[in-house]
Image (cartoon, rainbow, N blue to C red):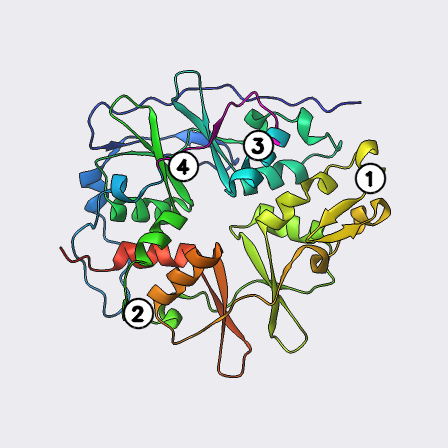
Amino acid sequence: MKLGFFIREHRTPTYATSPEHIRRISKVPDGSNQLCETLTVRELRAGKPHRSEGMKAGTFGPDLKEVMTRRLITAAESESLLHAQKLMIRNNITRLVIVNRENNPAGILTHRDMVRALVENPAGTPLDQIPIGYAMTKHPIILDTSASLKDACRLMISKGIGSIIVVDDAGKAAGIATKTDVCRYLSGFSETNIEVRTYMSGKPVTIGPNHSIFTVANILSTSGFTRLVVIDEENRPIGIVTLSDIVSVSATLAPTSRLMSKSMVVKGSLITSRMLPILLVRNVMTYEPIVVNEWEDIADVAKLMIRHGISGLPVVNGQGKLAGIITKSDLVRVASEIKWES
């Protein structure tokens, strides 16, 4: 028997007529998305974000249109999660902008949305039968091209999101600003004189190599994390497991008779059909992760992330033991607080 999916009523977001306006959403207690009031760039800039010691407020940096990704990969909400998965893997991206027929943003679909939909899928419905509209986040946060990089970073932090859709004056999708775009911009600096230890998370969530991928899927789908550091018995980082790793084997989270009769290549290894339901972290994690020391410069971290296409790096102390993790989210905080010089 197939699981029937209830598609919430679609509401095309209305866009501000002034180029200074931002549309934003908030999470209500039941977890649904609720459209909130319009916020102007002037109001956003009037806020007083936390500043680290030694940081000073400066200008608002480059315009968002100079930093954003203009090549959008889009999909329709009526298409399937299988189609979305293929688009993400083919284009090496972690999110899709969902548009209507007029190319107006209707939602956004991320790896976390996909994993959450699969974890909450008790009937094991296959991906090709789950519509994107079921899993996507509706009423996405939107900025227009008049905003600055610092505006976007502050909004990402306040709303706990990893990307903002950028629209033109007509409300059409013109690009997307992501944490990767922020990281790429910071990687252009020779140095920032900011050490990793200033912005790293000192107590990262860790996991062992012999945990089930279902444990990882549950942690990542219900938390704000996109990766877990895999450690050995001496607290040394031996791997990283990410949302992307879970999405790549997402079919195992929604088992079907067709899947169970086939084998799968995971991280270059052939996993037999009988082993698929009991995949472990060691089967999907990235071994020997790139690590950085606590005293390294943030600009060097940004360069490593862009060069290797990664979003988080374990931070080690002088003994090679895990001291924290530095992620693109942390670099967004840097960009929101750093003094931009003209």
Point out the frontmost of discs 3 and 2: 3
Which residue lies most toward the left here?
342
| Chain part drawn in magenta | 70-81
- Main SS class of the magenta portion in the image: loop
Determine the secondary structure under disc 1: loop
Q: Which residue is mark 2?
A: 194
Question: Counting other residues with Cα less than 10 Å from the Cα at mark 3, is it few (<14), some (14-19), or many (20 or more)?
Answer: many
Q: Mark 4 is on which residue type?
A: Ser
Rendered residue at 26%/69% (across/down): 53
Does the stretch in magenta take in 58?
A: no
Q: Mark 2 is on which residue type?
A: Ile
Q: Mark 1 is on which residue type?
A: Lys
- Mark 3 vs mark 2: which is more N-terminal? 3
- Mark 4 vs mark 2: which is more N-terminal? 4
x, y (%) of residue 70? 35, 36
Q: CA distance from mark 4 to mark 2?
A: 32 Å
Q: Which residue is mark 4?
A: 26
Q: Is residue 217 above or below residue 300?
A: above
Point out the frontmost of discs 1 and 3: 1
- Mark 1 vs mark 2: which is more N-terminal? 2
Question: Counting other residues with Cα less than 10 Å from the Cα at mark 1, is it few (<14), some (14-19), or many (20 or more)?
Answer: few
Q: Quadrant of residue 64?
A: top left
Q: Which residue is mark 3?
A: 84
Q: CA distance from mark 1 to mark 2?
A: 50 Å
x, y (%) of residue 21? 24, 31
Question: Counting other residues with Cα less than 10 Å from the Cα at mark 2, is it few (<14), some (14-19), or many (20 or more)?
Answer: some
Q: CA distance from mark 3 to mark 2?
A: 38 Å
Whether the residues at callouts 1 and 2 have beta carbons within 8 Å, the answer is no
Does the stretch in magenta take in 80?
A: yes
Point out the frontmost of discs 4 and 1: 1
Mark identifier at residue 328: none
